[in-house]
Image (cartoon, coloured by chain):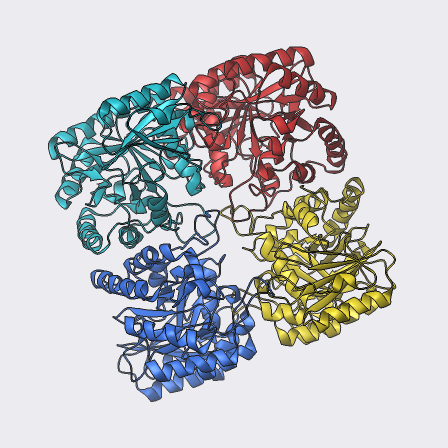
Chain colours: A cyan, B red, C yellow, D blue
Amino acid sequence: MLVVMQAHATPEQIKAVCEKIELMGYRAHAMPGSERTAVGITGNKGAVEPGTLDELPGVQELIRVSKPYKLVSRDIKEENTVIRFPGTDAAFGGKGLAIIAGPCGIETREQAFAAAERVAQSGAQFFRGGAYKPRTSPYSFQGMGEHGLQIMAEIRDEFGMKIVTEAIDNESLELVERYADVIQIGARNMQNFSLLKKAGRMRKPVMLKRGMSATLEEFLMAAEYILSEGNYQVILCERGIRTFSHHSRCTLDLSVVPVARDLSHLPIFVDPSHATGHRERVPAMARAAVAAGADGVMFEVHPSPDQALCDGRQALLPQQGAELIGQLRAIAAIVARKVEAVR
Amino acid sequence: MLVVMQAHATPEQIKAVCEKIELMGYRAHAMPGSERTAVGITGNKGAVEPGTLDELPGVQELIRVSKPYKLVSRDIKEENTVIRFPGTDAAFGGKGLAIIAGPCGIETREQAFAAAERVAQSGAQFFRGGAYKPRTSPYSFQGMGEHGLQIMAEIRDEFGMKIVTEAIDNESLELVERYADVIQIGARNMQNFSLLKKAGRMRKPVMLKRGMSATLEEFLMAAEYILSEGNYQVILCERGIRTFSHHSRCTLDLSVVPVARDLSHLPIFVDPSHATGHRERVPAMARAAVAAGADGVMFEVHPSPDQALCDGRQALLPQQGAELIGQLRAIAAIVARKVEAVR
Amino acid sequence: MLVVMQAHATPEQIKAVCEKIELMGYRAHAMPGSERTAVGITGNKGAVEPGTLDELPGVQELIRVSKPYKLVSRDIKEENTVIRFPGTDAAFGGKGLAIIAGPCGIETREQAFAAAERVAQSGAQFFRGGAYKPRTSPYSFQGMGEHGLQIMAEIRDEFGMKIVTEAIDNESLELVERYADVIQIGARNMQNFSLLKKAGRMRKPVMLKRGMSATLEEFLMAAEYILSEGNYQVILCERGIRTFSHHSRCTLDLSVVPVARDLSHLPIFVDPSHATGHRERVPAMARAAVAAGADGVMFEVHPSPDQALCDGRQALLPQQGAELIGQLRAIAAIVARKVEAVR
Amino acid sequence: MLVVMQAHATPEQIKAVCEKIELMGYRAHAMPGSERTAVGITGNKGAVEPGTLDELPGVQELIRVSKPYKLVSRDIKEENTVIRFPGTDAAFGGKGLAIIAGPCGIETREQAFAAAERVAQSGAQFFRGGAYKPRTSPYSFQGMGEHGLQIMAEIRDEFGMKIVTEAIDNESLELVERYADVIQIGARNMQNFSLLKKAGRMRKPVMLKRGMSATLEEFLMAAEYILSEGNYQVILCERGIRTFSHHSRCTLDLSVVPVARDLSHLPIFVDPSHATGHRERVPAMARAAVAAGADGVMFEVHPSPDQALCDGRQALLPQQGAELIGQLRAIAAIVARKVEAVR
């Protein structure tokens, strides 16, 4: 259920509606828009008994949301969600293209700073690096842990880039929130609902990667878990799905970009590095992602990929990364990232 | 690396080998067999420097394990792992067929007892029921939590069946271990490596379900995470994969049964209820699973499926469950569950 | 549209209904059942204007068939289609289990006769062998052509088995119909609609293999192409689909068996040899197919698989084939191949 | 096996090499390059016995081609294949972007001319339209046949665009070659090897669409069938694969573009209309295809999509098509369609 407020509704009126909803035993989610605020209601089993909500001052109308996802839906918030970082021009979902680059894993202070310097020069607003690495084998490098986070915090201070890094469980989530600017939840944890709920109680933006076998609806429902707990700053990220087609590590499903933009107000990102698994395929797929309308791209850069402890084969050389960013910005200028709705 | 002991090696000699391995900075895993014990070595980066291990008393030979999975491999343990429950004839991986049945979720004490009574009568050795339910939607029934576990513990006392139930995070894992007999880790958490490691430090058997997009190698590697922490009692469970084929909720990949039996010594189970999503398809696929050589089958039974809070459409009526078990035992008698190796 | 005749309708009344339908510009398909005959109408765009059909003598009622497939649907023919071969007990869809065995390709007269002798001894009613081989590479062995067909015709005369072999285009289709007893259309040609239509004008039964990416609906629609031309003797055959799961060549989708039996009256077969690609996996999946309710199984047997010109790795040795058939008949005796409908 | 000629080899020397190869019982395929000619050898079982080939005048060296595809491989021809249409600037694989547009099916002369006029105005060099339609249902519109081909031939005369249309069997193939400029072979016929061989004996270029479950290797092998018969003018076309992901009709696998460009010298196209199935998704995926490096795009345009007899939902309005072509040319100018090889 959605309570649409009148255009001139006052903050007090919105607050009164929220309080009334909470009194009824539900949860209220005020979603401000450029013209009016809408208040989403969750926590109900079946239909909300709207009672006298529509008689409250400032309420324009009540709308039932029929989709299984509520708060992530464009039905509840028509405008794109823009996630800003005060004091910088870094943003997700705004007019500019957001670029996240950096090595797969933080391996040493030297490696991380060498990568960060080159990434900063190339014009990326965000630096990525893994301190906690979900690895297929228990015998592979599992990341530096908190020390890796500390190195990334220093990189932010030194180069001004915002830090994006992955949390893999409740313990690492708290540490990641403390040190980083954007919490990444990986594909393998996309339906780790316990982690999603906890991320929903954090105050930092969450980049949620699509699971390798997740439908778009399941992907949006996973984001809904985060929003339903009160954290509305979520970025979706396509990173390839599992198919029979094995010339590429995963099959990058770029058609999810225009469809997600249609169904949801959340920003949508693409990670071509994990999808392709090969440095030489990354530029083509990064360009394709921007041409398809993605809000940004995340890719891996390593100063000396041959010595990387994980996924070196998919990391661009810093110079390649810089060239690619130039191409991406040129393509973004051609593509109006507007929604082309199916009605 | 695998240290194969001589057939007549003494417990002291085995202990000495393990201590030597630990002294070298690795982890030792003694795997007793019917004729001899093998000691697996993990925790090494690259090849183990075997030093003077082969000069220790009782050591027959050292073998390099080339597969990415070590402890789950038949290379390290030729005989089937059999998981027994002392004082009962319930077992996983033994000569008999193991049957796990029960409702998807524990909803009330009455519903659970009604289901359990019928399941016990039908001859199942294990009772299943969810106290923590991983649900696609944050707005769906999420399970009764600890109270559901308490009900299942009462059911064990009343009917003598062993209890299988799912843990979804570190908190629920500790509770599940306290109340249940077998810890289930669901498909969505198959690569929740943090949870796998913690399950590897538990003392109860773990039933690990295959992720919907997991290759067999990834499935075995997930099991390896559990064994590598010292818990060698793991049961694999196929429950359907994601494919384009949508006449069934998932595509049950029964060919994994003979291949897993060839590659690993761990018991292999099949869950036809979640795979098909339809009561009417469950018997055919349960029979097929046993005919393919599965060590057992887990399926859902509900005394009144139409009122189930989750997945009622796939639950068998108790009478159907009882008939099915009869057919399964008859098929199991025809199928020698022997390994047909590809060499 | 379906015209259901009264139980006591005479052949003349049925004929009159068919003529009336043809006069209206449609095509009539009389489908006799044990209690009554139904007459399917195809060739219409949109709804049939039933006119005065229901006033004709012997007509009980008119039913609209809402599914996209008409003639293959159980809505139009409730009883299983049984395809018999007069003078023998070989049948598809009857009470007994049908077994088709033989080498992948006919390579020489000696190889074919050696295989046939062993296959006949093992109790298979049908002999298979390829004279026209659809091969991924233009440089691979493409089959012996008509000479291969002649060898198989001799095998029929010698051993009494019925012959199943593949046609790959219009030319080979005519030859296959001349020499063989059952025309196979392979997975790669499942949507070669031109070939399907021509097969629909043949008078021999057609075994239609499911395409590697065909949904069940598409599979049934491909069969509908054959029936719509007047050939109602079609056997469906599952042979594995393309998925990400690569421990097996294809993923045998056995859940199609109970669903196809529910939706269609046509017999349903399974080919575990092409699905698994490994001799050692074939018996497990053949047993699973029969346990799931298949009307029969087709598998490959070769007297000396190591010298086979194609797919030798998946061919059973004759002795393995004979043992397997024994197991399959024992399982079939347990499984009542009845329809378990989802309603 | 590949015979590389010296840079200054004469036509007579090349001819002598080809004759020698044919004398040896193989087939010779002379592939001219900008610097030198290479002569591919096919028709051999196992390794070619090179005999005295390397002693012939003008021969530089003999190279073994280890890939299963030979003539389509970059190993045999380093330069891109460019397919030109004399007297026009239409080309596949050249520097410019090739655009194929038109309705799914030719329905009437009026509809086809209305579409063609708008398509010609928008700057497309090629007009597409189906006269033979492979339809899932035997009861759907199957195309106008030869009369549709005649209409398209008139369109070529009227508007100067080259005609691309599908052949579905041997009969239609001969007619399509007579009337059209480019023979399309559809996804469902990608492994109709009989049709491929016949197309290989035609003298018109062939656009080969990737099958819905074809690996890249199988796709290239299907092209190899055509080249092996002597027709070297083949254009590859990605049109979406079958996956579990159902927000789009098929999953457009754009990563095939850079990989195909690396492995093969053939032009690579993308069809976003059939992949997405929705008009609103087509522009995003067409842009992505060009950004990924495709040589061109084929999409559907219909003057009044709501009245289309097939696939109207995926056809762009003419105005949308014209706008899209502008964007595509702008993106193409940014993307150097160079090969980024994985070595």
> Which residue is at the front of the view, B163 or D273?
D273
> Which residue is at the front of the view, D131 or A207?
D131
Tell me if D70 is positioned left or right of D196 in this view. left
Q: Position of residue B165 (x, y in %)?
A: 56, 22
Q: How many marks?
A: 0
In the figure, A292 relative to B162: above or below? below
In the figure, D271 relative to A12: above or below? below
- Taking the view exactly as shown, the residue that stands out farthest to the bottom is D12
Q: Residue A201 lies in what quarter of the image? A: top left
Tell me if A42 is positioned left or right of C252 in this view. left
Q: Is residue B127 visible?
A: yes
Q: Position of residue B257 (x, y in %)?
A: 61, 39
Tell me if D154 is positioned left or right of A91 in this view. right
Q: Residue A311 lies in what quarter of the image? A: top left
In the figure, C137 relative to C263: above or below? below
Q: Residue at x 47, y 84 (%)?
A: D178
Q: Is residue D78 visible?
A: no
Q: Position of residue A78 (x, y in %)?
A: 30, 40
Q: Position of residue C269 (x, y in %)?
A: 70, 53
